[in-house]
Amino acid sequence: MTTQPPLRAVLFDRDDTIAYTDPGVYREAALWAAQTFGLDPREVGAGMQAQWQERAFTWWHLRTQADEDTFWNEYSAELAARLNLTDTQAQQLSARYPYEAFMKPVPDARAVLTELRARGLRLGVLSNTLPSIDRTLEFLGLNDLIDVAVATCTVGIHKPEPGAYRHALNALGLDAPEVLFIDDKQENVDAALALGMHAALIDLSGETPGALHDLGGVSRLVDRLGVASPTADTR
């Protein structure tokens, strides 16, 4: 009978795990544009959401920050045409409400991450997202708690492909059984389990039976799995 090693790290997804998209920011942005450019706020809000829906999954090929900058410049030009703005006005709107401005940390995110770090665990983020992951975590006020942040775009391999997880494990300097992975998509959880990681599904809506329903559940799961002693050998 083999004994599983104690945990040394928790690896989180970002969206709908430690952060969420706040639809209220669309209303805020629409009102700002209406006041600034004399537009109908309903048309601005609808246009911004329609633009994102059309472009939300067209960034998988981006690899560098320069690639992402080009993507957002094109995005801004398309939004200008959609809302009948000048290029300058669209750039002002994009600068006032960049991608990360629509994100908020989930309840108790900072408290839970702080508690996990206090227990000697390393913390990582592995997200199917654009290269600017560090900027988004800084905006969320969580970057100082994260040891390793991996945007799959920069790797060129996205979850649930095994290579994405292996890249994060290498960055953490740990083996799969030493890491707990938390994600809101079952296929991503299953891929982590297949590699030998501990893994759990989180559903912040509370609708999925058996899933974690808040980040506090991660701490309770860590209690059950056990944490490596702070005096244990590190690599």
Image (cartoon, grey):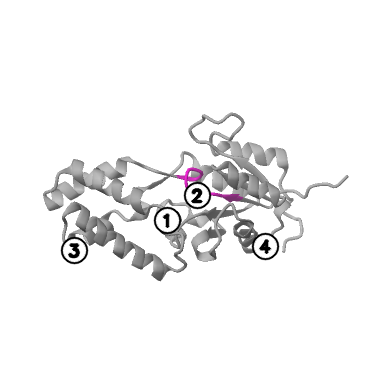
As shown in the figure, which amino acid type bears the numbered disc 2? Arg
Query: Which quadrant, please, contains the N terminus?
Result: top right
Residue 180 visible (yes or no): no
Q: Are marks 1 and 2 in contact (CB under 8 Å)?
A: yes
* Circle number at residue 136: 1
Q: What residue would you read off at disc 3?
A: 88
Residue 95 picture location, percent across and down: 27, 59
**Disc 4 vs disc 2: which is toward the camera?**
2
Q: CA distance from mark 1 to mark 3?
A: 24 Å
Q: Which residues are magenta?
A: 11-19
**Disc 1 vs disc 3: which is toward the camera?**
3
Secondary element at tag 1: helix
Residue 126 picture location, percent across and down: 55, 54
As shown in the figure, which amino acid type bears the numbered disc 3? Thr
In the depicted view, which residue is nearer to us: 226 or 21? 21
Secondary element at tag 2: loop
Whichever of labels 3 and 2 marks the residue nearer the N terminus, that label is 2
Whichever of labels 1 and 4 marks the residue nearer the N terminus, that label is 1
Residue 93 picture location, percent across and down: 23, 56
Q: Is residue 145 magenta?
A: no
Q: Main secondary structure of the magenta part?
A: loop
Whichever of labels 1 and 2 marks the residue nearer the N terminus, that label is 2
**Going by the image, does 76 lie left or right of 142?**
left
Q: Is residue 13 magenta?
A: yes
Report the number of numbered marks.
4
Secondary element at tag 3: helix
Residue 79 visible (yes or no): yes
Q: What residue would you read off at disc 2?
A: 14
As shown in the figure, which amino acid type bears the numbered disc 1? Thr
Q: CA distance from mark 3 to mark 2?
A: 32 Å
Q: What residue would you read off at disc 4?
A: 173
